[in-house]
Amino acid sequence: MLSTRDTHRGVAVLLLVVLTRLLLLPWYPLMDTTEARYGEMARLMVETGNWVTPLFDYNVPFWGKPPLHTWMSAGSLNLFGINEFAVRFPHWLAAMLTLAVVGYFAKRLHLPVTSVLIILASTVVFSVSAGAVMTDMALTLGLTLAMVGFYLCWQGDRLWGYIGFSGLAIGLLAKGPVALVLFAIGTGLWLLWRYGLRKNGLQKTGLLKMWRHLWQRTPLVTGTLLMLAIALPWYVMAERATPGFLHYFIIGEHWSRFVDSGWQGDLYGTAHDEIRGTIWLYFIAAAMPWSLFLPRAIYKIVTEARSSASEVVAKGEKQAAEQSKGVASYLLCWMLAPMVLFTLAGNILPAYVLPGIPGLALLLGYAWCNGRLPGLNAIALSIPVLLLITVVVLNFGPAKDKSERWLLSLRSEALPTYYWQRQPFSARFYSAGQADKIDALDKVDSKSDFYLVVENSKLAEPRFSHCSEVAHNKYRGLLRCRRN
């Protein structure tokens, strides 16, 4: 048991980690392509008033992801204006809700709540995603609700079963059917572990018992109806608004992208092609620094389980022991679900491991439930320090190259701005959609001077001889041109 003083220190460390992330939200620009793309989609949603179909560009529907993350950022932009804090803040809130759910679950499992939350909040991928304009934190919130809901419902709390199905609905609106697949892998592996694979391999009687208990303990029918009632209406409206969405999203994004790492049907970019199994390396790096403690944690869980198996449980601990039965294997399956899914996929990103990170934090808390993880506070405090250093470094150089905010800040807004042939998403966001893309100078609609942003390799072309350079970054130059 931790002393009151240690608990207070832990709370202070946790607050420092999460509040540092909050305070850093406005201090670096949206950078191409992921954050700037999703930020621009949210801005377009506010500008056009189209809250059904996210837009990739004016009059170009975005079929790649459901709209929850866009709704989140767009709603915040309506409240706080068009700026970096507004577009990132809802994703930080989603991270805080995820921490709250995990903290509640840790308390129900009699785990050290503060330690679990410190581990989760200071894991690299969680900390970064907590303030990033991406789909992954909303998905993680939904899957966390689903995994917590399933386990507590299995223990007899039926209300949490419905909360779990609501979490799956959030996942369907955050990233689509992949939420159901991740949930099915996590819970399915655990059920097989408990019922089908415990003795002498896969047993038919064990599987029948598993399905009977699943039917008896969880609201399968009514919960599924609740999930569909929440998520399905948007899918129907989206298909009606832009026919073809469901085929592209279900077949293209969830099948072709998974089985074909070089998929050529991507309407919004290019597919990644990583070596199969790379997701495990991503997990080790993204789950730093706590992935380093996993081997020791698993060893502790196994050895302590063996030593306690022969002991008689004290009378006052029977209820807690019964409730926590199988919890270690459940948390392990939760943590591993994303890696199991994406082991054979080449089209992956490091953030894909994020839905399993709450399972990692709870598993480490379970391993050290009777003590304190070595160096917990000191290790956790390194994360906000690294974040601060990263933001400083970004603003001293890389941010100027990865975002158009700096270039566009040097122009006079009284003059029109054009991008020559290529226009990054950050240019559209920071110009509020006013910087048009052109491929011929006769398309310039201006009777006075205008600004033109051109790739550095083309700056010396004769066609731009009537322009003078204002500034340039690594990739593009800002020119002020006279009207011929």
Image (cartoon, rainbow, N blue to C red):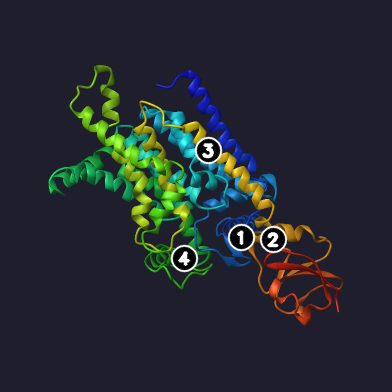
Front position among marks 3 and 2: 2
Q: What element carries label 3?
A: helix
Q: Position of residue 158 (x, y in %)?
A: 33, 34
Q: Nearer the viewer, residue 408 or 394?
A: 394
Q: How far apart, in angstroms, are the residues tagged by discs 1 and 4? A: 16 Å
Q: Mark 4 or mark 3, which is nearer the start of the sequence?
A: 3
Residue at the spot 48% in from the left edge and 42% down from the top edge: 123
Kind of residue sitting beneath label 3 = Met
Rendering quarter of residue 475: bottom right
- Residue under label 1, please give it: 32
- Residue under label 2, please give it: 404
Q: Mark 1 near mark 2, Cβ–Cβ under 8 Å?
A: yes
Confirm whether residue 137 shows in the render. yes
Residue at the spot 49% in from the left edge and 47% down from the top edge: 125
- Residue under label 3, please give it: 96
Residue at the spot 36% in from the left edge and 41% down from the top edge: 294
- Residue under label 4, please give it: 272
Q: What element carries label 1?
A: loop
Q: Mark 1 near mark 3, Cβ–Cβ under 8 Å?
A: no
Q: With 385 as the anchor, is 337 left or right in this view?
A: left
| Count of number-bearing discs | 4
Q: How far apart, in angstroms, are the residues tagged by discs 1 and 2? A: 9 Å
Q: How far apart, in angstroms, are the residues tagged by discs 1 and 3? A: 26 Å
Q: With 203 as the anchor, is 480 left or right in this view?
A: right
